[in-house]
Image (cartoon, helix red, strand yellow):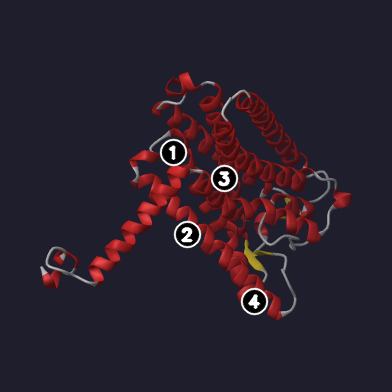
Amino acid sequence: MCNSSSMAQFLLLALADRRELQLLHFWLFLAISLAALLANGLILSAVACDHHLHTPMGFFLLNLSLTDLGCICTTVPKAMHNSLWGTTTISYKGCAAQLFFFFFFLGAEFSLLTIMCYDRYVAICKPLHYGTLLGSRACAHMAAAAWATGFINSLLHTANTFSLPLCQGNALGQFFCEIPPILKLSCSHSYVRELGLIGVSASLGLGCFVFIVFSYVQIFRAVLRIPSQQGQHKAFSTCLPHLAVVSLFISTSFFAYLKPPSVSSPSLDLALSVLYSVVPPALNPLIYSLRNQELKDALRKLMTGCFSGVTTCLIPSAEHSLCNPLLA
């Protein structure tokens, strides 16, 4: 038996044995991370610069983009490094930091998805009370509660997990540090407390899921009463992508943490972890930008302005001589 803090490093799951497949995984992760960074960066810039997006939904979308960037930057770079250099090791402190930040951003994202569902519910079912229920102060308090929930949840899980005595080696059957693989390394009956914390977190998550389902039932009932087909289509096109992302996020994460050990396998665990840790952060900006006309207009304006600014500086004139200090 040894305490986890006495370990110098953990061994992560190798995504492939052949060098060609390792490089393929590297380029795949690089493409996903660059797409997520670019898309979320554009959303952050558009929401910050366009006053038309200074709305509750725009504010929550900005926070969601921050959590998406955090999730991608926590897990993918280390996987890319290991695939490129053919290594599988991660230090003890690096593993603890990765688990903490992953759960921090994951918990904040789940809370923000629940809040965004509430935003849609108020906008469609109680439009006359929208300004009262979702004022600037209320939005700030809800966003702060989402980040605080993620922080407290992550701190409790990380502190408890890395205080467990380990007696099953140091090989994690996952491509990043996660709680279930570490619990498999712990000695018998030493992980009951962490399982209790997971149960509490799962109960809170289930409560949020019930709230989301109830909200969408009310939303769809209200949408079906809209006489205009165009109004129904607009409401459904706004809500259904959000529901799809939430369903994917919740179902895969719940199954990954609550599935019985008898159905566990390295390939299944890897697929589930990718589905809830990599896919949603890459899909969120695409879904919300395609279904939000104001956001699409802001992105088009932002990209047009950047292109015009670059063109102006590349082809200076008397009116734009400030682009080059030598021409001023």
- The quarter of the picture where residue 230 lies is top right
* Label 1 sits on residue: 59
The answer to whether the residues at label 1 and label 3 have Cβ atoms under 8 Å apart is no
* Label 3 sits on residue: 104
- The quarter of the picture where residue 195 lies is top right
Name the side, left or right, on which 143 lies relative to 157.
Answer: left
Q: Residue 287 at x, y = what percent?
A: 56, 48
Near mark 2 (Cα within 10 A), the count class, few <14, some 14-19 or many ≥20, is: some
The answer to whether the residues at label 4 and label 1 have Cβ atoms under 8 Å apart is no
Disc 3 or disc 2, which is closer to the eye? Answer: 2
The answer to whether the residues at label 3 and label 4 have Cβ atoms under 8 Å apart is no
Viewer-proximal residue among 156 and 208: 208
* Label 4 sits on residue: 23
Q: Amino acid at mark 4?
A: Leu
Mark carried by residue 38: 2
Viewer-proximal residue among 80 and 275: 275
Quadrant in which the N terminus appears: bottom right
Near mark 4 (Cα within 10 A), the count class, few <14, some 14-19 or many ≥20, is: some
Mark carried by residue 75: none
Q: Amino acid at mark 1?
A: Phe
Q: Residue furthest bottom?
A: 19
